Every structure is written in C-alpha cells, then in structure tokens.
Image (cartoon, grey):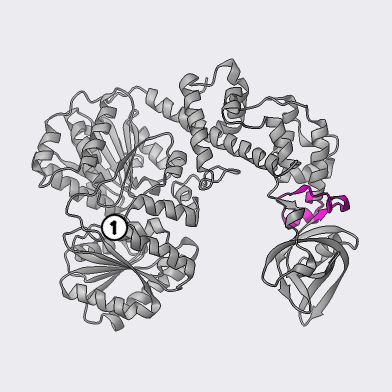
Amino acid sequence: MHPFLNISVGKLPFIGTSREALLNEMGILTAEDLLYYFPRRYLDRTNIKAISHLVTGEDVTVVGEVINSHIQQIRNRRILHVTLRDDTGYLTLNWFQGHQWIQKMLKPGETVSVSGRVEFFRGHTMTHPDFDFLDKDQINTGMLVPVYPLTFELRSRGLSSRVFRKIFNRLFNECPETLPDPLPDNILGNNRLLSYRDALYQIHFPKDETSLKSAWYRFKFQELFMLQLLLAMKRRTIHNQKSAFACSRAGETIHKLYHSLPFDLTKAQKRVIKDIYEDVRSGHVMNRLLQGDVGSGKTLVAASIAAIMVDNGYQTAIMAPTEILAAQHYQNFNTLFSPLNIPIALLTGKQTVLKKRDTLQDIASGKMPIIIGTHALIQEGVSFNRLGFVVVDEQHRFGVDQRATLIKKGLNPHVLSMTATPIPRTLTMTLYGDMDVSVLDEMPPGRKSIHTRVIQSSQINQAYDFIKKEVMSGRQAYVVYPLISESEKMDLRAAEAGYEELKTRIFPDLNVALLHGKTPSREKGKIMNEFKNGNIHILVSTTVIEVGVDVPNATVMAVENSERFGLTQLHQLRGRVGRGGNQSYCLLINRKNSEQGNARLNILEKSTNGFEISEADLKFRGPGEYFSTRQHGDSGLKIADLVSDMPIMIKARKEAFELVSRDPQILQNRHRTLREFFLKHYKDKLDYVTVG
C-alpha cells in the first residue's frame, strides 16, 4: 500500500480540525477512506428539468438560484417557504421542520440543485426536497457533477457536496500520479479494467458517461473479486484439512436401510449420496450444502450417510431449528433405523432433568450413534464420543456461531448443511461460495403438483366453501397468517382475530385450532399431534409451521395477506401440503389486490420450480432477506448489486478461484499489493483461513 493512502485525514493540509472531527464521525479516518467515499448520484445537465416544463406528480431535479425565504405561521405550524428561480420561472420549496438550519443554509444568491416530487399550489412546489449546492460555473458546463451521501445533520454542520468536491480537488492534487493496484496486472488486462488511481479519479471527476461507467465497473469487479477470493481461500482451507473420520467402507447398514424402504431412491438422491460418500471417504473434511424443495428427500440422504457413519464407528448429530422439526426427524429416523436395531437419541431443551442426564451419558459413552436435537446440542455439558458427521437442517435458521459451536464438539467432523429454501445461483456464489453444493432437483414419483390460485377479497367466500368441501371429504387444511417481526403483536392479534372468526362464524361445525410462536411448548406439541391424528380439521397458524410439519392428510394451504410474504417463503408454505397421495391446493389470499402484488403472486400460479421462484423473488425483493436469515447482517457489498451485477460476479469468481489455485496463500511477489489490501480490509472475515 502506498504511504499516502494511510495518511490521517487530519494531516491533509486542506482539512482542518473541525472538518477532521466530522469526517471521523463518518468513519473517514485516512486518505484512503476519503477516496472511497463515493458519490451516490451525479447531476447531468441533460437530465435537469427547466421550471417552466415541470409536470405535477413527476420526480425531477431542478437547478436554480435562491431568491428569498420566509417562515409562515399557520395555527400551530411553522412552514418555511424558499423561492428558487431559473431562466424559465419560479419554484416554491416547502419545509415543515428544520427551518432554522435550512433557512440559514439556503441564502439568497446560492445556486442549488433540488430533487423531489412536483406538486401544485398557487404554482409549482416541492415539499422537503433533497438539495445540494453548486458553483455557478457548474450550471452550464455540461459536466457530470457528483452528489455525495450526506445526512441533513452533516449538511447543517457545514459538509455539503460542494465542500466535498473542493476537498477531492485538493486531494487529487496531493495524490501521487500512480498508486499500487490491488488487482494484479493480468486480471486488469483480462477484464479491461481501469487502473486503480484512474478509476478513483473518474469516480469523483468523471470525464464523461463512458469513463464513469468504466470506473464503477472497476470497483464493482474489485469488490466482488475480494469477496470471491475470501470464499476461495476458505474453501481451499477446508478441503486441505485432514479428516479423522475417513469412511473406509459403506458397510451393511446402508444396504439394509435401502432394502427396508418401500420405494426406490430418485436418481437425484443416488447422485447426491454418491457425491457425499466420495467426500467422507476422501480423507479430507467435507463442507457441503444440500438444497432441495420440501419433499425432495433430503432427510433420506442424511440418513444414508448416517448409516455409513454407523458402520465406520462414528457418531452423527442432526441439529434442527425447532422442537417440532427435531421431534419429526426423531420419528422419521426411528422408523428407518429401529428395524436395524440402531438406537436414536433426542435432545431438546424441554426434556426433564433426569431424561436429559441419561441421554447425555449415552451420547458421551458412544452408546447413541445418531443424535437429533435442537440448539440444546451445543450447550455446555453435551459431550460426544466420536462425532464424525454434523447435519444442520434448515441451516439458515441458525447463526454462524451456533453452527461453529456444534462443529467444535467434534474434531473437524464432516458437515452437511441442508435447506429447503431454494437459493438463486447469484446468492449461492456469495453466501455459500466456500462450500460444495448439491441440489436435489427431482421429486419422488407419485407426488402430484399442487394447484395454486390467487384469491381476491371478493372471492373469499368461495375459498371458504372450497376449504369446507375438502374437510367434508375427510381432508384437513391450514390457514396461515403473516408474522412480520416489526409488527409481531399486531400480526398475532390478526391471527387470533382470524381464528375466532373462522371458528365461530365461518366454520362453526368444524374443529378449528390456533398455533403460533407464543403457544407454550407442551400445548404446541399437543395441537400438532391432534392435527396429525386428524382430530383438528383446520389449523390456523403463523409461519411457525413453515418448517417441519408433515401431515399427509392436509390438502389445503390458505395464506392470508399473501402479498406480505416473499415468494420463496410462500413456496415453502405451499410445500407443507401435497405430502400424501391426494390432490392438494394452495390459496393465496391477496387482500390489497395491487398490480405488483398480483404480478408477484401469479408467478406461484404458473411455477412449482423453487429455483425459478427464488430468482423471481430476488428480482422483486432484493437479497436482504437471504442475508439476514444467514445472520451475517448483510452481503458486505457496498458498491456491487447481486442481481444486476451477476455477469461481473461470474468473471470475478473465475479470476479469484484461478488465482488461489496458483497461489493458495497469496504469497507470490506479484500479488504483494493484493495481499496487503486483502489483509487490511478483510482480516476480520478470515475466520479459519490460513494466510501465511
């Protein structure tokens, strides 16, 4: 790294003490931090609208001169009016708060750009527009003028885009003509990328639209390359770890297990089991993600590998996110393994002290080869005998630390993470680029496609009649209400109110029950057993049933306010029916009947392919929910966009993985600048990666 980049901003000759304090508050400590404070948009003279051409309802940018301002008192409200003028007319700007600072900043004679929605009241107006200061000579130059992301508080304390433009002008005068480039020369050449300093300059002072696009492309590529480099190194580190649990044989248990099944495995299941078996016999640690829609047979894949572990003398631990799902796995594994005389242990937080003590002793002694549990598996006092295989089911429901804690209870065990959430290819590269990925892309034969229909409010009585008809035919139904964390209490009240209406007014002759996250654990188990046994006709629930409920007789999934769910979540809810041989149905009740809501939900009417649906969900909703569920906070990306920048991601990934294959620890001299940059900016993300 060039020494200039590490200079404290306070030591730059044009910053000053008060400005240094403000920049430090913004997290800008060094010259490098300052250079990476990128504009959020650019003013292009060709996109600026003349006041005389404004149309009510449009979102536009106007540039003009402040003529005057005054505060008007209307009853208890004080409104600031500022008059702006350009060569074609006048525009009134209105603020209902922040009068003192705004009036102080927007002095007569100032040239400003304002952006907002055009309204009309005795002439064109804008309310609470975003504004920025310009120099008079910038109005007619035709140049792209950078506008920086600044809060109102920072602007009121003297930092504006105009100030930043002056700072950057001085900064580039001080900056050396060349800076060492973190990206190696061959990668720059292969991808026709601007040099480091050139790209930085064009970001802040773009020569034209083409130069600006090239600069942004360069930094998007760089950000994605560094992320993929991190994943490539993690993946290599894991693959190079020697395993104490190499399986020398498949053994008899897996063959007995197969012969006991009343059906054949799908080709996809056989392919994935073969891949995993190759991993666990290789002598290296496995780290694999298994994706597959609800009902595609992930549990049987995990059971098959557990059977191999049994014959090699190793224990298997399966961690599920809820007690309901853990209990269901326990039941399924018992059905599979009890005919083979292989005992299964269940460990949850709700067990009695005596039961838990006995179970812990059996686990520690090695008496229990297969252990299924909730997060109770990672608590203190849980000790395994020879933990060789860890399965994390619905892994996105666990934090990174929770998974790591379970893994640490073994000595580098093989890890299989499973998810029924179809993850788009872009996000698989980003979230799980350090893992091998297997996909169960085939459903077991005999599974009928679930008929899905979007229901508007006007059709709700027809939907209720249909549910009643199914129940009278001996089937069962779910009615699911959204539960959004920001409005959990309100949503819970809506679910409770909906339950009361369904129970007393809509289906008074049927047995209707309510299940939600606040339901006591024992009562929850009782309700689920009653539903499984067919004693409850309609289960009203929040999304607590999204994962892990298997009731073959349930044929209707009705989702209230379905416009509030993501498509992927709706697809998973839909997968809770269709578990038996009967035709099943999903009714998506859209209370808002908005055009966008209908467009989204119609995708589920047309497709049952989880990966197609997840790609559509990503386009509609963005990657936020995928990252938050993995509990990483976010993608860590500040510049690149995972949806629109997929082609850049593919190129960056290819370069990063090729580099790591040639220089695993980035030690070659030609990669020195890359190594310094990587260690400086990604040190906290290295985890268990060996670098040097």
Q: In the rendering, at what x and y percent does residue 413 appear? A: 32, 30
**Considering only vertical position in the picture, is 546 above or below 563?**
above
Question: Number of numbered discs present?
Answer: 1
* Residue on which disc 1 sits: 575
Residue 508 appears left or right of 180 = left
Three-letter amino acid code of the residue under disc 1: Gly
The N terminus, quarter of image: top right
Q: Is residue 478 magenta?
A: no
Q: Quadrant of residue 174?
A: top right
Judge whether residue 553 can be spotted in this image.
yes
Q: Secondary structure at mark 1?
A: loop
Report the front residue among 217 and 76: 217
Q: Is residue 143 magenta?
A: yes
**Considering only vertical position in the picture, is 496 above or below 169?**
below
Report the front residue among 149 and 16: 149
Report the front residue among 367 and 472: 472
Report the front residue among 185 and 54: 54
Q: Quadrant of residue 602?
A: bottom left
- Identify which residue is drawn at 82% across, 65% down: 100
Q: In the rendering, at what x and y percent does residue 105 appear? A: 84, 59
Residue 372 appears left or right of 565 = left
Judge whether residue 688 can be spotted in this image.
no
**What is the span of residues highlighted in magenta in the rendered image?**
133-161
Q: In the rendering, at what x and y percent does residue 684 appear? A: 55, 34
Question: Please, which residue is most extreme toward the right here?
Answer: 109
**Considering only vertical position in the picture, is 497 above or below 234?**
below
